[in-house]
Image (spheres, rainbow, N blue to C red):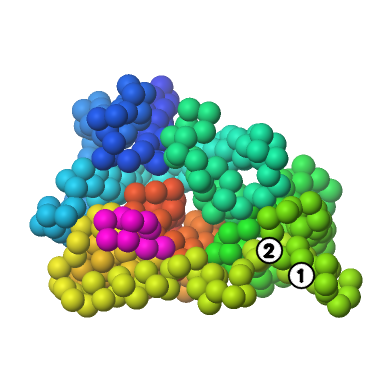
Amino acid sequence: METLDQKNYKKIIYSLTWFSFFFCINLNPIEFGEFNLINKLRILAPLILLIFSILIFKKVNYKNLLEIDTIFFLFIFLLYFIFNIINVDNNLANLFWPVYMFLAVFFLTTITNSDERRSLMKLSIYILFIAFIFYFSLAIIDMIKHKNMNFYGILGSNDSYSGIKNPPRSSGLARISLMLFAYFLLYFLIKRSNHKNDYKLLLLICFFATCTNLFQSRTVSFIFIGINLALIIFYFKKIILNKKILLFSLLIPLIINSSYNYLKYKYSYTNFYKEDLKTSDSKMEIIGHIAKNSILRDQNPDSLNSYSSGRFENWKKAYDLIISKPLIGYGAQSDRIYFKQSIHNAYLYTLLSGSILAGIFLLLINLRTLYFFIKYIKIKILKTDFISSLSLLLIIIITQRSILETSLAIFSIDFLIFILSYMILKNKTSKNI
């Protein structure tokens, strides 16, 4: 029987270990030799703390690695690892990606229990909140410094900013903002819906709803609309009883973003729509155009590939590579080798890096998440459980984002949040069958 001090000590160590996984993201292992001491410690911290946890607490449930859910993930990591070694074009330093994906799953499945995972979900939200405020502040500073009103593309084009290596792109900040928006909105609907005048919480919802669309990531904007519709359907009665939530989650953010777009078009000399807006047939057309772009970013009508930002062409090339060797993958980060950039699709990345076999396991994982969704619909108690509801909502966000981003299939924020949510739902649904 653990004492209170032992439990607190364990909680601190586990929290530091989980935090270290987030803290080493955005470091490229290929550049390890060029890292300063701090970055070397950052990238090694998860491994060091994990070993420390095992040695100190000496409680590892290795049998949990044999559970069917865990096996799906492990086979994907193993295939990435094997094909990374086989492919002579791939750098062995890229073994970091499947190894750290394995370490994160190993930590969650064999070392932590269900209650500890739920605590780690709360910690993850705190981490996302602090990270967003920090990088959002840097984005504002960068915009003022360069006299640039456009949030899209901010920071992501810089190799380093204020001494920070590889700051997140605007799409990454939009993704974090969407997760925080989902958290605060769901918290209000489940735990505070009777507090009609809880303006602090409503303002947080409004702030993150606005920021989600301010960065104009088309992928995230579509998901934002879907999440709002889903929550309206699931919590229709609560929303009808407290209509203020629609004002703060949709109407006010739309007005703010429309105003931002108006100012951007009016004062920007580089936006190709500026001349078009001058010759528009009516003010209503201008207003409609600006309102539309408060949710969906401009696209060049002369380029059929502009909406996908070149994704479709790369997808076709990736498909040809996969078909040429369907049972042999090219290893982790192979899209960077053959396309010099992300393939922007988690499923194609998995097929390319781990072959069709890894693709099958990713399909099984997605079918399993569909099962969680069905169980959530059937089991009423889950709808009132905040952490379970949040986990499902985060899985929906990340799964949808994986259609146009690879982050679910690599060691990333999306991956860490996904596997944590997955393990929480697996445990919760199995208890309520």
Which residue occupies 67% across, 50% down? 150
Whole-percent x, y for residue 416 in the image: 40, 49
Task: Give the quadrant of the C terminus.
Answer: bottom left
Above or below for 65 versus 339? above
Within the magenta stretch, is there residue 341? Answer: yes
Above or below for 2 versus 418? above
Whole-percent x, y for residue 214 in the image: 68, 53
Which residue occupies 55% across, 74% down? 303
Which kind of residue does numbered mark 1 sit on? Answer: Asp
Q: Residues within 10 Å of mark 1 (few under 14, many from 20)?
A: few
Q: Nearer the viewer, residue 3 or 55?
A: 55
Which residue occupies 54% across, 54% down? 171
Q: Is residue 190 something that shows in the picture? A: no
Task: Give the quadrant of the N terminus.
Answer: top left
Above or below for 316 versus 63? below
Q: Residues within 10 Å of mark 2 (few under 14, many from 20)?
A: few
The image quadrant of residue 300 is: bottom right
Whole-percent x, y for residue 24 in the image: 37, 36
- Element type where label 2 sits in the image: loop
Which kind of residue does numbered mark 2 sit on? Answer: Phe
Residue occupying the far right of the picture: 283
Whole-percent x, y for residue 86 in the image: 10, 57
Q: Which residue is mark 1?
A: 276
Q: Which residue is mark 2?
A: 272
Q: How many marks?
A: 2
Q: Are marks 2 and 1 in contact (CB under 8 Å)?
A: yes
Mark 2 → mark 1, Cα distance in angstroms = 8 Å
- Element type where label 1 sits in the image: helix
State which region is magenta: 336-344
Q: Is residue 19 left or right of residue 149?
A: left
